[in-house]
Amino acid sequence: MLAAGVVLTSALAACTGGGPTGDEPPQSSQQTQAQTGPEISDPRSPFAVELCALLPPDAATSLGLEPTGEVYDGPKISPDSAESCVWETPDGHTSVALAPIKDRSIQEYYDHKSAFSDYQELTIAGHPAVRANQGDPAKDGFCAMFAAVSKREMLYAFTHEISKTDPCGLAQKALEASIPTLPPAK
C-alpha cells in the first residue's frame, strides 16, 4: 500500500501540469452549479457505505485486484474529497483508488473541458461521467474518471498501471462495478 500511496501522490503531482487538474476542476459560481447539469435519474450515495466497501470484493477480484482495499492515508485526492481506498494487484503493478466527492457537479467538468488534454464525456452505469486528465493516460499509465452519482456527489476513480495497457478502461470498469452497489440517495 505504501507503494500505491507514493504512486498516487506522484500521479497527482504529474497530472497537475500547472493548470486545473482532473481532481480539482476550475471553480464556477455555486448558483450556476446548482442550476445546471444533467439530471441524475437514479441518484446514489457513495457516502452511505464504508470507504473500502465502494468496490465489492468479487468485483475487485474480477478486475485482477486483491479483494480488499486499504484506506489511503496520504494527501487527499482533492480538498473536498473524502479519503480514498486503494485496491492493488497481487504484484503491486496496478492500483485502483476510489473516493466519494461531495458538493461537486459534473457540470463543472463540462464547462471546463478545455482545461484537460485528455477529456471525454461518458455514461457509466447509467450515470454521466467524464474522463479528465492533464496527461496522456496511455503514456503515463494514470487515469482519472469522475461519475455523477447524484446532483452534487461524485465517485472518483484513479488508476495506475505500470504496464500502461489501459488505465482508463480499468477506471471505467471499477466505476461500473461500484455504482450499482451504492444505496439510493435519500
Image (cartoon, grey):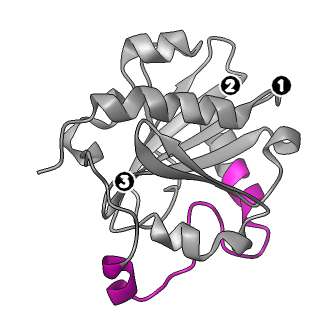
Q: Which residue in the protein does label 3 denote?
A: 82
In this view of the protein, which residue sits in the foreground, 152 or 125? 125
Give the answer, above or below, for where 162 lies relative to 27.
above
Percent across and percent down for residue 182 are 27, 35
Amino acid on which the number 2 mark rests in the picture: Thr
Badge 3 crowding class, 10 Å Cα cut-off, few under 14, some 14 to 19, many 20 or more, is some
Amino acid on which the number 1 mark rests in the picture: Ser
Query: Which residue sits at x=79%, y=38%?
Result: 141
Cβ atoms at labels 1 and 2 below 8 Å apart: yes
Percent across and percent down for residue 60 are 48, 17
Give the answer, above or below, for where 99 lies relative to 37.
above
Labels 2 and 3: the sequence-earlier one: 3
Q: Which residue in the protein does label 2 denote?
A: 94
Labels 3 and 1: the sequence-earlier one: 3
Cα distance between the residues tagged 1 and 2 = 8 Å
Cβ atoms at labels 3 and 1 below 8 Å apart: no
Cα distance between the residues tagged 2 and 3 = 22 Å
Nearer to us: label 3 or label 1: 1
The secondary structure type at the circle numbered 1 is loop
Query: Which residue sits at x=57%, y=35%?
Result: 172
Count the marks: how many? Answer: 3
Q: Which residue in the protein does label 1 denote?
A: 163
The secondary structure type at the circle numbered 2 is strand
Amino acid on which the number 3 mark rests in the picture: Ala
Image quarter of residue 70: top left
Residue 25 in view (yes/no): no
